[in-house]
Image (tube, grey):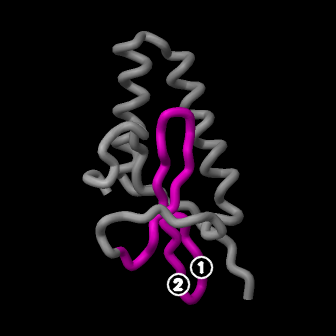
């Protein structure tokens, strides 16, 4: 049976994203760029959804039950995992990080 993906977001992803968008909109005073980034993140996640587990895994230092995958959006990386149950596959979006940070420490 072919399973379709259900999209899910962790609160930590929203915290990461909100921090970045708030910084761009309020500190850098560029609301247009902040909105554009939000749109690009949404489009990238939606585009990945049909084939979420068909991409290379992102290797992390910790051993994980469900491997991480990544999507590059401008200078940021969206991290997600695919959780498979008997009835569905879930693309769970977990983090949104600036690509030049020490990502290995944060994951």
In this image, 28 relative to 42: left or right? left
Q: Considering depth in this image, is 11 or 66 the residue closer to the camera?
A: 66
- Residue contact at pointers 2 and 1, CB within 8 angstroms: yes
Where residue 101 appears, x then y in whole percent?
Answer: 33, 40
* Whether residue 90 is situated above or below residue 32 in the rendered picture: below
Q: Considering depth in this image, is 78 or 84 the residue closer to the camera?
A: 78
Where residue 95 appears, x then y in whole percent?
Answer: 40, 51
Q: Considering depth in this image, is 55 or 31 the residue closer to the camera?
A: 55
Q: Secondary structure at mark 2?
A: loop
Q: Residue furthest top?
A: 29
Q: Residue at coordinates 60% horizontally, 50% vertically from top-left? A: 45
Residue 73: in magenta span = yes
What residue does disc 1 label? Answer: 88
Q: Considering depth in this image, is 61 or 52 the residue closer to the camera?
A: 61
Residue 39 quadrant: top right
Residue 93: in magenta span = no
Q: Residue at coordinates 39% horizontally, 35% vertically from top-left? A: 18
In this image, 103 relative to 105: left or right? right
What main secondary structure does the magenta stretch of the protein show?
strand
Q: CA distance from mark 2 to mark 1?
A: 5 Å
Specify few, some or many for label 2: CA neighbours under 10 Å numbering under 14, 14-19, or 20 or more: few
Q: Secondary structure at mark 1?
A: loop
The quadrant of the image that shows the N terminus is: bottom right
Residue 20 quadrant: top left
Q: Residue at coordinates 56% horizontally, 39% vertically from top-left? A: 73
Where residue 83 appears, x then y in whole percent?
Answer: 50, 75
Q: Which residues are magenta?
A: 64-92
The quadrant of the image that shows the C terminus is: bottom left
What residue does disc 2 label? Answer: 85
* Whether residue 10 is situated above or below residue 83 in the rendered picture: above
Where residue 19 appears, x then y in whole percent?
Answer: 34, 33
* Whether residue 68 is situated above or below residue 86 in the rendered picture: above
């Amino acid at each position: 049976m072919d399973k379709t993906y259900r999209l899910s977001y962790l609160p930590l992803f929203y915290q990461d994203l909100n921090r970045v968008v708030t910084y761009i909109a309020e500190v850098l005073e560029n609301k247009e760029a902040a909105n554009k980034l939000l749109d690009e993140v949404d489009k990238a996640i939606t585009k990945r959804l049909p084939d979420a587990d068909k991409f290379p895994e992102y290797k992390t230092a910790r051993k994980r039950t469900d491997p991480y995958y990544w999507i590059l959006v401008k200078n940021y990386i969206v991290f997600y995992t695919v959780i498979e149950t008997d009835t569905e596959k879930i693309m769970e979006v977990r983090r949104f990080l600036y690509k030049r940070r020490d990502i290995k420490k944060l994951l």
